[in-house]
Image (cartoon, rainbow, N blue to C red):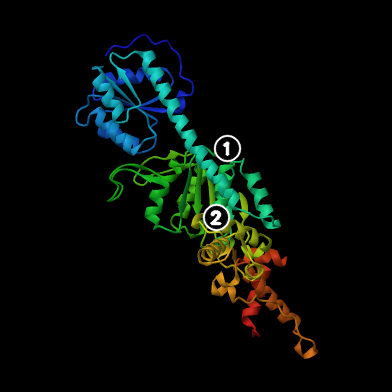
Amino acid sequence: MSVSQDTGETAQGAGRNTILIVDDDEDAGDLVRDVLTKRGFRVELAPSGEAALEAASTNEVDIVLSDIRLGGMTGLELCERLAASRPDVPVLVMTAYGNLENAVGALRVGAYDFITKPINVDVVAHAVRRAIGHRELNIEVRRLRAAVDAGRRMEELLGDSAPMRHVFELIEQVAPTDASVLITGESGTGKDLVARAIHARSARARGPFVAINCAAMPPALLESELFGHEKGAFTDAKQKRAGLFLQARGGSVFLDEISEMPAEMQPKLLRALQERKVRPVGGDGEVAFDARIISATNRDIESEVDANRFRADLFYRINVVHVSVPPLRARPRDILTLAQHFLEQCARRYKKDVVGIDEVAARKLLDFDWPGNVRELENCIERAVALTRMTHITATDLPEKIHDYQPSRIVIGGEGPDELITLEEMERRYVRRVLEACGGNKTQAAKVLGIDRRSLYRRLDRIEDGKEVE
């Protein structure tokens, strides 16, 4: 292979990208590697198309520069398979047979560019820089679209109540930092929307947002999903795979339902977060990762720590900033705003002329406790829009449990002394009502009552031991 004189020019930003050279001629591959390394690029070599596909599957490859003639899989076949599996990776094809037929064939199967041999240093460097620019532009477009979508999700966190204004303020404050965030709240309150809003408003908005439900898979599979695995690490590990921590490079990892994480996985996660490195399953070494950690749980995680079901040191590691998403019953001011928002969405989707909610139905919505929170409200409004024959949702369009719901009240007593209750009974009823309103979250209930959790536990023990009067 002939190579022209190297001018010594360094490609700006080259060091951030990895070029994979695919050539079964070791000397030729070494020569191109040396040329690009001098220009500031990170370069890896693959001796075959099969090896190149495996390397590209790890998501660590940014550009592929392949000879068109390879033993086994040809450069054109490699290009076609990469276009299907890694469309984000531009492929440059090199050939000594620089005719129109080969050029058209390469472009037809998805090649980004075509380089003829003998290789010219400046031509190769320029083609690689163009390919990098093309890839970064495509990534930016995708990231911006994702950020816009995430921003729209932020708009779904509607509300003008004091609890929601506090959530919005926290999102704006914590988003520009890289601090770990723990989001707590009942199911259906929108914890995932808060996580996406934090990501969308951060410096990592152009990076990926990778989410996983920690309660949805067994420990062995969860470890592989988070940390990745080596080829042959277990029965179905037919090729090397990067875990979510590495896939989220430059972005955020969302660990949903983290309090459900199996006990045997907690120390491994803690070590990864402390060292900012992961060890793939079946691997001998550790790999550094660059991702922000956002976690969420619908449980009272401090109680889980007290009960030794969740490691205290892991809790402190993920709970640098705490965002508590209020239940819908704690922000009744937002119920009708959200209901109207969902109504308009559903009316457009079902092409129905439904424009509002009548007064009786609105009162029913305000009186209901909404144990399923915003998700349940959305489901209720979608059902009502689908069933109504009117331009306004009426009470009869609502689910029976909401239509017939009788709001609970704490009754202090009647008109005469015989109907009044003791102070102890009043305390019992109020503590139980606050705990119910907080969805069983003892930490939140203690804050509402203005006492610490241990004092609340003592009161609850006393209530359980005493005879309760219904």
Q: Kindly identify the amino acid type of the residue bearing the numbered disc 1.
A: Ala
Closer to the camera in the image, 344 or 257: 344
Question: In the picture, residue 458 is in which quadrant?
Answer: bottom right
SS under mark 2:
helix
Question: In the picture, residue 442 is in which quadrant?
Answer: bottom right
Look at 34% across and 13% down and name the residue there.
120
* Residue underneath mark 2: 345
| Mark 2, other Cα within 10 Å: few <14 / some 14–19 / many ≥20 | some
Closer to the camera in the image, 31 or 197: 197
Closer to the camera in the image, 28 or 90: 90
Quadrant of the frame with the C terminus: bottom right
Closer to the camera in the image, 399 or 270: 399
SS under mark 1:
loop
Left or right side of 93 for 258: right
Q: Which mark is residue 203?
A: 1
Check the image and name the residue furthest to the left: 72
Q: Residue 22, can we see it?
A: no
Q: Residue 26, can we see it?
A: yes
Q: Kindly identify the amino acid type of the residue bearing the numbered disc 2.
A: Gln
Quadrant of the frame with the N terminus: top left
